[in-house]
Structure formats: C-alpha cells, structure tokens
C-alpha cells in the first residue's frame, strides 16, 4: 500500500514538473518578433495617452546645442514636420546601440515625408558620444540639452533609450521606453498623425 502511494506521489510530482518545464520553455522560446508584435498590439489597443510623465508636455522652448547634422534648430524641425521622433540615447546604452541602425534606416527611408528623426544625447562623455555617432554613421540631427540635469528632471528621462513622438506644435503625444525598430516607429507616428 505504501509503495503505491509513493509511486502515485512520484507520478504527480513528475507531471507537475513537466507542465512547469513546458511553460518555461514556451516563454523562453517566444520569439523576439512575437514580443515586438505584442508591443505593437498593446499600443493599438491602449488609451490615447501614455503614462510617461512627459506626455502632454511641450518641447518647443527646450534649449539644445547642436552636435551633428544640426543645420536647423530643434524648434524649426518640430514646426516644419508633422511628427518629430526624438530619441534620447547614450553611447554606453546597449539597446541604444541596437536601435541606432533602425533609426538611421527609418530616417533614410522617409526623408521625403513630413517626419523627422532627432537624437538627443544624454548622460555621456563627448568623446564617447562622438565615437558612437561615427561608428553608426548617424545621418539624422543630434543635439544635447543646454542644461542637461534640469531637462532630464523636467521630462523624467530615467531609462534609456526613451523616445518621444512629438506633433507639429511641440507637444509630446506618445513616449516609448526601450529599444525601437522601424515598424514600431511607424505605428507610433501613425498614432500621432491620427491624434493631431
């Protein structure tokens, strides 16, 4: 009788661990594409505004200094484009390194549209920033805050990368924390266009 009970307990425990193990394997095997698709679906189903502190704030008066490709002021870029994508990055940030080719690709593919990609470098050393921009051959305008600590505090940019999607009036309509890719950028831009 005791042997049957022990066998039963062993069988139940084995089944339990197999089910848990299968669940873990399913989660681990969820593809990167699946995760991106989920984030896009979440965006499409979400309410009209994000929870990020900066959503609803205006960037039109923000003081920045040009770093590269800065023939226009940030204000002029915002005013002359239907949507401006402002990406906050640093050279030491690994997801920033991964997304920069995506931002470059998007910029090059959409130059004839009323959309602009802009980078704002924060929390970085100038030499490291410049090496990063050269390594990735960044084509879009890049700036730095004139008063970095005050601006970071104002917009609550605590995690990088963070990307703001700004309308023609300078209002931050959406904010995305984390690595972006071209399809996600397009979806957020479409949201801003519809909201404007």
Image (cartoon, grey):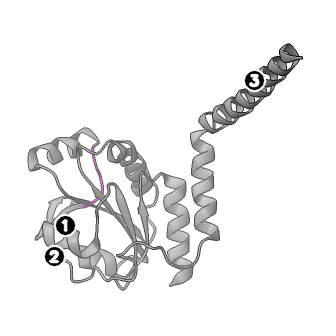
Q: Determine if residue 6 is in view.
A: yes
- Contact, mark 3 vs mark 2 (Cβ under 8 Å): no
**In this rendering, the label closer to the viewer, 1 or 3:** 3
Q: In which quarter of the image is residue 31?
A: top right
Distance from label 1 to label 2 (Cα)? Answer: 15 Å
Question: Percent x, y for residue 129?
Answer: 17, 48
Marker disc for residue 14: 3
Nearer to the camera, 24 or 42: 24
Q: Residue at x 41, y 54 (%)?
A: 178
Distance from label 3 to label 2 (Cα)? Answer: 63 Å
Density class for disc 1 (Cα within 10 Å; few <14, some 14-19, many ≥20) is few
Question: Percent x, y for residue 62?
Answer: 20, 78
Query: What's the magenta bit mostly, secondary-structure-wise?
Result: loop
What quarter of the picture does the N terminus occupy? top right
Q: Give the range drawn in magenta.
A: 137-141
In magenta stretch: residue 129: no
Residue topped by disc 2: 63
Residue topped by disc 1: 71
**In this rendering, the label closer to the viewer, 3 or 2:** 3
Q: Determine if residue 72 is in view.
A: no
Question: Is tag 3's residue or tag 2's residue first in the polypeptide sequence?
Answer: 3
Q: What element carries label 2?
A: loop
Q: What element carries label 1?
A: loop
């Amino acid at each position: 009788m005791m042997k049957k009970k022990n066998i039963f307990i062993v069988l139940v425990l084995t089944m339990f661990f197999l089910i848990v193990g299968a669940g873990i394997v399913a989660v681990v095997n969820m593809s990167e594409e699946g995760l991106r698709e989920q984030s896009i679906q979440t965006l499409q189903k979400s309410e009209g505004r994000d929870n990020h502190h900066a959503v609803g704030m205006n960037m039109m008066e923000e003081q920045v200094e040009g770093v590269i490709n800065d023939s226009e002021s940030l204000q002029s870029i915002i005013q002359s484009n239907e949507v401006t994508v402002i990406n906050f990055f640093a050279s030491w940030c690994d997801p920033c390194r991964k997304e920069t080719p995506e931002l470059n690709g998007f910029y090059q593919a959409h130059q004839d549209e009323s959309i602009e990609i802009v980078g704002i470098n924060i929390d970085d050393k100038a030499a490291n920033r410049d090496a990063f921009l050269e390594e990735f051959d960044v084509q879009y305008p890049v700036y730095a805050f004139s008063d970095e600590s005050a601006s970071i505090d104002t917009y609550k940019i605590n995690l990088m990368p963070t990307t703001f999607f700004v309308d023609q009036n300078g209002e931050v309509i959406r904010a995305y924390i984390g690595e972006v890719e071209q399809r996600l950028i397009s979806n957020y831009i479409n949201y801003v266009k519809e909201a404007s």
